[in-house]
Image (tube, helix red, strand yellow):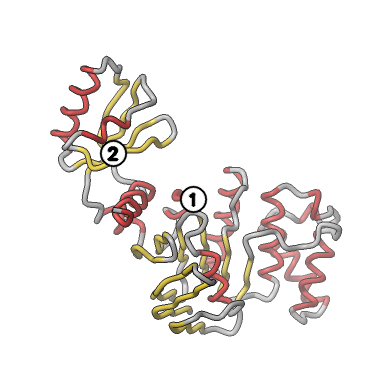
């Protein structure tokens, strides 16, 4: 439903998006994954026709699409119902149809009991659900969501993704950007993005399967473990919460070398074990290779 070829957008001296080529097919849940400043929002806006690329080609098929911007853009001094009616009128939908569709969507998003509440009085997760409700009023075949769960609590994020899966089952194609690597795992296909460049695309399983290194998860009594990265058996290591993930060339050799090194430094090991790579491991390795 969206196809781009060598899409590039430049703002002054900044190349926000550089040579992006990808294809979003009907029925996909596509994730644009990367940190702030990766170029995700600029790419999303070009998808919607809100900004023009400097070069390259973009084609969007289908009769309709819904767009949910990164920042909450509804009216805080209007109630949930008033916001829905306002945006339904913008879509030129008659009041009877707005009422029927909004009742259906509000049930899906668990907002049916909050019609009279002002938008400013909603929680962050509920505000995002309201924005999604308004984006769905026109029954779009394609839904474009720019970081819809950014800053939202983990439980609300889970609820939001359940809604997205239900919509996808009903035939809605979804493009969603996110800085959260756990959300990348939920997409059918992902594009890993950094500094305006698509580094890799594919389904999460294939990207993890093609990861060229082993991963050791280490929990120890010390927090400063960067010295492990100096071992020749180690590719790189980083903390993930209270655990240290170490990318290694050979799991058994690296495991032995790490145990010996920590013993020399009198650092107690709670455990060290091999784990499958996560999308975060894949992304971190790719960005560090890019910098090198």
Tell which residue pokes out farthest to the top in this image.
266
| Above/below status of 117 relative to 255 | below
The structure residue drawn at horizontal position 81% and vertical position 71%, both measured from the top left corner, is 86
Question: Badge 2: how crowded within 10 Å, few (<14), some, or many (20+)?
Answer: few
SS at mark 2? Answer: strand
Is residue 75 left or right of 247 when viewed as pictured? Answer: right
**Pointer 1 residue:** 180
Foreground of the two, 19 or 112: 19
**Pointer 2 residue:** 275
Distance, label 2 to label 1, CA atoms, is 20 Å
Task: Give the x, y percent position of residue 184.
Answer: 44, 55
Task: Give the x, y percent position of residue 41.
Answer: 55, 65
SS at mark 1? Answer: loop
Is residue 26 left or right of 220 when viewed as pictured? Answer: right
Tell which residue pokes out farthest to the front in this image.
13
The structure residue drawn at horizontal position 61% and vertical position 80%, both measured from the top left corner, is 64
The structure residue drawn at horizontal position 72% and vertical position 63%, both measured from the top left corner, is 73
């Amino acid at each position: 439903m969206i196809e781009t070829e060598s899409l590039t957008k430049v703002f002054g001296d900044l190349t926000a998006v550089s040579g992006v080529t990808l294809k979003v097919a009907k029925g996909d849940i596509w994730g644009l994954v990367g940190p702030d400043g990766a170029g995700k929002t600029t790419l999303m806006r070009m998808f919607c026709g809100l900004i023009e690329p400097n070069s390259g080609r973009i084609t969007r098929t289908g009769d309709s699409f819904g767009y949910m911007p990164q920042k909450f853009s509804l009216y805080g001094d209007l109630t949930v119902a008033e916001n829905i009616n306002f945006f339904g009128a913008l879509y030129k939908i008659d009041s009877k149809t707005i009422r029927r569709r909004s009742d259906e969507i509000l049930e899906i998003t668990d907002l049916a009991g909050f019609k009279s509440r002002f938008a400013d009085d909603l929680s962050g997760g509920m505000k995002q659900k309201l924005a999604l409700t308004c984006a769905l009023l026109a029954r779009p075949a394609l839904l474009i969501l720019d970081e819809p769960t950014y800053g939202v609590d983990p439980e609300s994020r889970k609820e939001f993704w359940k809604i997205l899966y239900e919509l996808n089952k009903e035939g809605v194609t979804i493009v969603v950007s996110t800085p959260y690597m756990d959300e990348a795992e939920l997409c059918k296909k992902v594009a890993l993005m950094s500094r305006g460049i698509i580094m890799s695309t594919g389904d999460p399983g294939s990207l993890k399967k093609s990861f060229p290194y082993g991963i050791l998860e280490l929990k120890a009594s010390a927090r400063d473990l960067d010295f492990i990265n100096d071992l020749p058996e180690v590719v790189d290591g980083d903390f993930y919460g209270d655990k240290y993930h170490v990318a290694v060339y050979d799991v058994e050799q690296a495991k032995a070398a790490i145990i010996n090194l920590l013993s020399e430094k009198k650092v107690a090991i709670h455990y060290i074990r091999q784990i499958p790579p996560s999308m975060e491991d894949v992304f971190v390795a790719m960005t560090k290779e890019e910098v090198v």
